Every structure is written in structure tokens, then in C-alpha cells.
Image: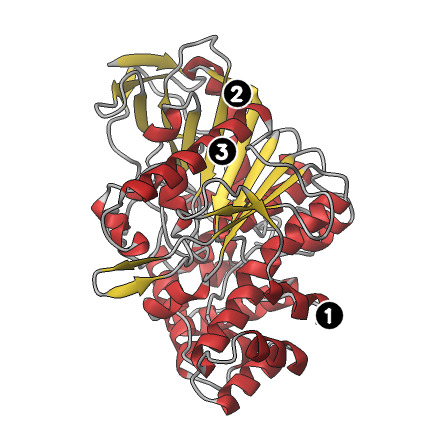
Amino acid sequence: MRVFTTESGTVAGTAFVSTPGVVVLRGIPYAAPPFGADRFRAPRRAAAWDGTRDCAVFGPVAPQSAQLPGSPAWSPGDEDVLSLNIWTPGYDGDALPVLVWIHGGAYVFGSSAQPDFDGAALAGHGLVVVTLNYRLGFEGFGHVPPAPGAGACPDNRGLLDQIAALEWVRDNITAFGGDPGRVTVAGQSSGATSVACLMAMDGARGLFRRAIAHSPVNACASPGSAARTTAEVAAEAGVPATFDGLVSASPKVLVDASDRVTDGYRRDPASGARHYDPAIYGPVAGGAALPLDPLTAFARGAGREADLLVCHTADELWLLDAVGSCARVTEEGRFAAFAADFRIQEGVLDAYRGLAPDASVHDTYLAVYGDLQFGEYSCRLAEAHARGGGRTRLSRFVRRRDGRGRPVRAWHCADIPFAFGTLDDENVHFLIGGPPGAADRELSSRMTRAWADFAATGDPGWPPLATADGPVRIWDTTSPDVPVGRWDAFRAPWRASGLPLITP
């Protein structure tokens, strides 16, 4: 056991058995519980404690209905949900690079306790690794009208939680051997879009030096769409869409109401864009904290002071199809309706058909939708950051495998266990197609090393974007000696037609 001193009190961590020299601490509060009088408010500083806090277990997860393999579920009544975890090989004064991880989950589920986010392997490369929980769903991203006589409730409370965690890192990480001047913030999916939002927010400026965004999702709400979502959720909860009405509803009532709103879109093919992937929450762009969506902000030079590493997978949406979280489109009439709902030009569909003439309608739909939501959006974020004056690296994960009787594609989330070095955890084997082989371990070693080098020096091992064609780092088990390539042919249709931005 080792004891560390923070501004709120002392904490005790334990040695990580599988990675000698690494100490892990779990469940350290970085802000006060966001309930009671603090519900729907910006995060407040955590209260100090007496004695030494034993940090052996993860803190409670944020309100949600999901139950993920190997992860704890939310239990109504759990309130101390704003906590973080640290894996460190260092001692006070070591000044090691720091990597702060923001989990994904469509802004409504997930936690830092997921087994694929274990920081031990990265810490073994000389990083101090921090993972964190933040408010999700309505608690974190629902629009709340002003409270009479008490002022406004800020939008993007989940992002404000992330800023509070970064401020905690700035003020305390030295005690754990970290350098507050060498912080990299990283995330995947909605966590990656959170990273991009933080790069565009004045409130996060100076809290990190570098950023990693794997599969950022093309989804930011407008103030108007956020207000409409609040009206729908309040109606399902049976309360007025006012501060008093919403605060009278328990977190569980709002979780359940949000699930019913989501299910209504999922069941209704005529409900527009939300039918295909009914994620009803996202960062609200257009207010004081986040004036612009990240892509627009990057194009205007926001975030250029932070180095950026972007990655996406080749087959993003196949995971959402496999777990049943996106609509199935199997015939041409529905494919055309999908394109109309997202304002996708017919030329894009024709180009995809021409590039993969033997693909089924369903597979063509998954390819188009996956690139709209993740692949092309990721590339455009990287290119906008580079054009705005930032140093930007772009990469693409293409590793595929036949596993357990079915092919496993390079789908959403499959790259993260490789980057974290958590391939041996059985909970991630669905993502990667079963237990890892030697080639998988070699690929994981290269990806983990790239993250560690980027956090330490800003150079993950390949050149920054120089032109619209790349270079692009290709992550695959079959091409370890071909580190860079160019963008693939499926980008051409979007370049010709433009990429619509999705507003939840």
C-alpha cells in the first residue's frame, strides 16, 4: 500500500499485481455529488475528508439503465458518481506524462470501471493514467430551463464534469508522479466527441497539451433540439418541462423516461433521423460554454494549440448492427428514405454501390451510415484541425478476424482493447473475435506504444497530416511494416457532396 496526499485528503492505493511497479487507486472524488441542491448545476469542489481514504474499489457509476459485461450497474441512491481512478508507476516529483481517459457510450451509458479501460499496461509504459466518471443522460446533457429566482442550469453538465476532473488533475497529479504540463486527454465514440468539444471550449483551455480521439461521433445538439428532447422526456416522465417539474423527478424516473423516448424512435420508421440510431442526447452547441460544434470550431482554428491524434475503424457501424442498437435497412426503398432523412445526396449512394457492387443493400447502408456517423467525420475533424494550424495525426484501424464461427470486422470499439493492452480480458473477446493471437498481441504492443509516445512527446511514430491525402497510419495485423497509407476510395463521394452534420 502507498499513500498519496491530495488537496482534499490522503488516499491509499495498492500495487497492481500483473504490472510490477504500478499502483492503482480507484474511486477518488474529484467533485461533490451532483444531487440534492446541486442537481442540474455545474460541478462543485469535493469536500475534504479526515484520515486516509482507502481507494480499492471503483466509485458508483452515473445514472443509466445499461448493464455492461464486467462492469457495475447503477444503483438508484448512489450519489458520489463524480470520481476518478489512477494507475501510476511514479512518485512525487517524477513529472511523468499523464493520460486522462473519457469513456464513450452515446452519452447515456458506460463508466470508467469497464474492463477494457484498465490503465495498467499504459502505466507500464511510463504514463500516469486517469479514468473518470461523469454525468450521463438527462443528468449530464439534458436541457433544463432556468430555476425561478435561482438562475440558469448550464447545458453540457457532463462536459463541465470532465473539465472539473481535468482541473483536479492539474492541481493534484504531481503527488502521483504526473506532470500537469504534459496532460493528454483521450476518448472514444461519445468520449472522443467530448474530447473534441473540450478542445473547442474556453473553459478547458490550458488543462491539456494533447488529445486523442478514437471514432468521434457526428452528433451535437442545437439549443432548439435539446429543448424539444426535454419536452419529450418530461412528457414521458409525467412532469412539466420546467426546472421545478424536472427536479421533482428522480434520476431513475428520467432514465426510464429517456429510454421510452428512445424506444419510440426506434419503433417508428417515419420518425426521421433518430429512428436509425436513437441517441437523443449529445453536447449542446450554440451556448456560452460551447458556442460551435467541434468541426466548425476546428475549421476556425479552435484547439490548434493542442496536438491531436485521430483514429477510426474501417467497419464502424457493424458493431451497432450486431448488438441491435441501430435500425436494419435491407431494401432499396428504405435505403432511399434513410438518405433523405440525413440529407445524403443520391450520388453518395451510387458511389458506394459502384465501389462495392457485390454488397447487399444492408451492408451498403452500414458502410454509408458508419462513415457519415464516424469514419468521414473523424477524417474531417483531423483535417480541419490541421488546416486550422494544429499538429494532427490520422490513423485507421482495419484489423479483421474470423472468430467463434463468424467474421469479426474492424468495428466500433474493437480498437480500444488494442490501445489499452487489455486483450486478455474475456469481457472484450466479443469485440475482438475471441482470445488474442500472437499477431494481435504484436499489434496491441504497437498501438499502446504509439499512445504512450504521443502522450510523452507528441510523436506517435508517423508524420502529421501534410495534405488532404494523408499520411494515414494503418493499424492491422497483416502489415506491421507498412506504417502509413492514404485515405480510402470511400472518402471521394463525401468530398464531392459534403458531409451533413447530425443533430440529435
Foreground residue, 478 or 503? 478
Circle number at residue 439:
none
How are the colours assigned in the image? secondary structure
Which amino acid does the dot numbered 1 rest on?
Answer: Ala
Foreground residue, 155 or 422? 422
Circle number at residue 171:
2
Kindly state the secondary structure of the residue where label 1 is placed: helix
Which quadrant holds residue 344?
bottom right
Where residue 334 appears, as percent x and y from the top left, is 50, 87
Question: Dot 3, crowdedness within 10 Å: few (<14), some or many (≥20)?
Answer: some
Please name the residue shown 50% across and 39% down the image: 186
Please name the residue shown 65% across and 51% down the image: 381
Horizontal placement of 383 versus 174: left or right?
Answer: right
- Mark 3 and mark 1 lie on one chain; the one further toward the N terminus is 3
Please name the residue shown 67% across and 44% down the image: 200
Which quadrant holds residue 47?
top left
Circle number at residue 496:
1
Image quadrant for the N terminus? top left
* Residue 218 shows in this picture: no
Which amino acid does the dot numbered 2 rest on?
Answer: Asp
Which amino acid does the dot numbered 3 rest on?
Answer: Ala
Kindly state the secondary structure of the residue where label 3 is placed: helix
Task: Give the label, 1 or 2, closer to the camera.
Answer: 1
- Mark 1 and mark 2 lie on one chain; the one further toward the N terminus is 2
Where residue 133 appears, as percent x and y from the top left, is 40, 41
Where residue 289 appears, as percent x and y from the top left, is 66, 46
Foreground residue, 154 or 83? 83
Horizontal placement of 278 versus 197: left or right?
Answer: left
Q: Which residue does the numbered mark 3 point to in the structure image? A: 450
